[in-house]
Image: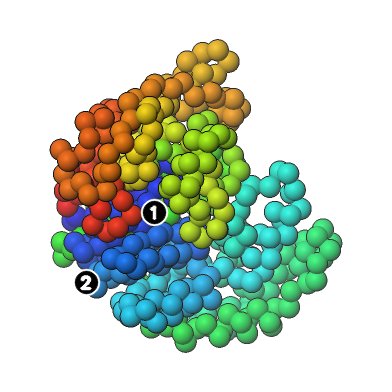
Amino acid sequence: MPALVLLGAQWGDEGKGKATDLLGGSVDYVVRYQGGNNAGHTVVVGDQKYALHLLPSGILSPGCTPVIGNGVVVDPSVLLSELSGLNERGVDTSKLLLSGNAHIITPYNVTVDKVTERFLGKRKIGTTGRGIGPTYADKINRVGIRVQDLYDESILTQKVEAALDIKNQVLTKLYNRRAIAVDQVVEELLAYAEKLRPYVSDTVLVLNQALEEDKVVLFEGGQGTLLDIDHGTYPFVTSSNPTAGGACTGAGVGPTKISRVIGILKAYTTRVGAGPFPTELFDEDGEALRRIGGERGVTTGRDRRCGWFDAVIARYATRVNGLTDFFLTKLDVLTGWEQIPVCVAYEIDGKRVEELPYSQTDFHHAKPVYEMLPGWTEDISKAKSFSDLPKNAQAYVKALEEMSGAPISAIGVGPGRDETIEINSFL
């Protein structure tokens, strides 16, 4: 039962799309198990660049079946638009499977998300405003709309009425907005039903049968470990579980079936949105990392905050996910620095701390303790093996591996599909 989980080991944007795409030709199914169109992957195939927001990266691999699991929240308009865009570029999307138990992002979820963020002002979380959080809140409050509800108008109407009973009170009396009409929402959602029908499936059954038949299934997380609702830098997190455990609940596959957990690490660190970030840079180095690395959010379009590699959060990701391997991305971006700082610990109230503090207050006050590693100036984008890398680049990778607590099995040396050094096979 070769089931692999591939996830972000930092704050997201680590290059998971490239890693998934690299494995896509060798796997039978690629499954998104959480998040929604607040996450994004960029995949470069030849001279073509694909920006994926909701679809699994495996959709670009002809022999692979892409799956949107029950743990994902789905905006039907975004999904259909993304499918249409790929079809226009000659990508076959007919094999996509969509869980009937996935929750729908409704128009009122998007409205609530946007007005709430504006209302919070300086205390805002930094959401994408796409309705993700409110949809997960509805799910937990048991007033959510699932994909399968689109095929029973009576049930759909009852559920929309139940959800809007309270939301309209909040919108009109707290936010001074117009009430949302039930009939209008139901009509809009029903319009998606037949367009989505070819993809809707019992994905839990399909995936478990695939594993029983020794098919290779790759579970793809969105965002990153430090954005996990339970294990991230709360409250500046996403509304789901990008960590490895989320693959089990978000796809309906038992933990005993997971054989490998791969963490994607960027050779430096970035994050989007508000929240603590100990190694964040506000100088020329930070701007250089942003420029050279092309650090702009695929989905949000926002500039990413940039900083040096943080080994403390890498160790934390290894622990909470049970990581077996790392895929190190964007090593090429660091070419040209004479010395490269790496955060090996934090200083909190004058004390050295080598593990991520569980206290939100302590983490907000954490100051990075750096170790300087020698840099390199040679172009590494054509390297095909680890020995092709400059000695200092090799030493950098080995140092990160030792600090992070799991072997680095692949290294990205450029944005292209073929610009990857594979040290140990993931399959």
Q: Amino acid at mark 1?
A: Gly
Q: Secondary structure at mark 1?
A: loop
Image coordinates of residue 87 in percent, x first then y, are 38, 81
Quadrant of residue 331 within the rendered picture: top left
Q: Amino acid at mark 2?
A: Gly
At 45% across and 74% down in the image, what residue appears? 82
The residue wearing badge 2 is: 63
Image coordinates of residue 401 in percent, x first then y, are 28, 32
Q: CA distance from mark 2 to mark 1?
A: 21 Å
Q: Does label 2 or label 1 sit earlier along the sequence?
A: 2
Above or below 222: residue 46: below
For discs 2 and 1, the disc positioned in front in the rendered view: 2
Q: Secondary structure at mark 2?
A: loop
Q: Which mark is residue 136?
A: none
Dot 1, how many residues are within 10 Å of its Cα: few (below 14), some (14-19), or many (20+)? many
At 55% across and 58% down in the image, what residue appears? 300
Q: How many marks?
A: 2
Image coordinates of residue 106 in percent, x first then y, are 60, 71
Dot 2, how many residues are within 10 Å of its Cα: few (below 14), some (14-19), or many (20+)? some
Can you see residue 261?
A: no
Compare residues 242 and 364 and report the one nearer the observer.
Answer: 364
Can you see residue 338?
A: yes
The residue wearing badge 1 is: 221
Q: Are marks 2 and 1 in contact (CB under 8 Å)?
A: no
At 28% across and 66% down in the image, what residue appears? 46
Q: Is residue 366 left or right of residue 166?
A: left
Q: Is residue 324 left or right of residue 278?
A: left
**Quarter of the rendering occupied by the N terminus:** bottom left
